[in-house]
Image: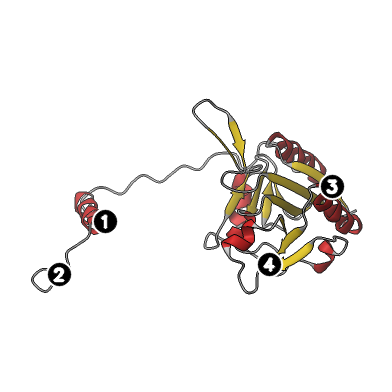
Amino acid sequence: MTGGSPVPDARARVLARIRAAVADAPEPPEVTRDYLGRHGTEDPDALLDLLHENLTDYRAHVHRTPPSGLPGLVARILAERGARSVVVPPGLPEEWLAATRAERRTDTPRLTPRALDGTDAVVTGCALAVAETGTIVLDGGPGQGRRALTLVPDLHVCVVRAPGQVAASVPQALPRLDPTRPLTWISGPSATSDIELDRVEGVHGPRTLEVVLLTES
């Protein structure tokens, strides 16, 4: 405190200078948004094939199954990956894990970072998937849970309902998403590379991403 008034912090000073500098600036021109909303077909089967292809390019492991085969497929994936424990986000359909023998851990009360790190896998749904980019979008909705649940366990099994949750492109996906929600955009397992361009997976999130495309039949 100086002279009875708070000393402005650096951020406030910088913002004040910016506001003063642009106070008399003209309004920026309107942005022309004449880009294509999509770049290919709207056929649901073709879009599903494109999503499958692009997910695989990003080193995700992709499976397809009708609803009747989902519990068995999820159980097989967890077993083959050696997952002995799995996080169950709030709102995840119970039948998805009906066939697994892995220990189920709920997030109520919230699991600690240590508990999450000691959990082998997480199974979630998603908000959307983008076919053209092979991207899955999570928004923390029912069956997805908070962001930490999908970043800490080493294995993420994500179920995408097709065709309802498949958007052709990013421009078509954005209007279907709520920008006030915590959006996480996933393109393959977490990966990075050092200055030698050696790829390392699992640094900032799951080492393994298994995507299940849940078809109608």
Q: Earlier in the sequence, mark 3 or mark 4?
A: 3
Is 177 positioned to the left or the right of 83 in the image? left
Considering the numbered disc 2 on the image, is that residue within a helix, a strand or a loop? loop
Amino acid residing under circle 2: Met
Residue 1, numbered label = 2
**Considering only order in the chain, which callout, 2 or 1, is on the residue closer to the N terminus?**
2
Q: Which mark is residue 142?
A: 4
Percent x, y for residue 128?
68, 53
Local packing at callout 2 (Cα closer than 10 Å; few below 14, some 14-19, many 20+) is few
| Image location of residue 177, percent across then percent down | 60, 58
Q: Amino acid at mark 1?
A: Arg
Asked whether residue 29 appears in the rendered view, the answer is yes
Give the residue number, with chain letter if any, for mark 3.
64
Decide: marks 3, 4 in contact (CB < 8 A)? no
Vertical position of residue 1 compared to residue 192: above or below: below
Task: Report the amino acid beneath label 3.
Answer: Arg
Q: In this rendering, is residue 62 above or below 103?
A: above
* Observer-nearest of 1 and 10: 1
Query: Does 41 appear above or below 2?
Result: above
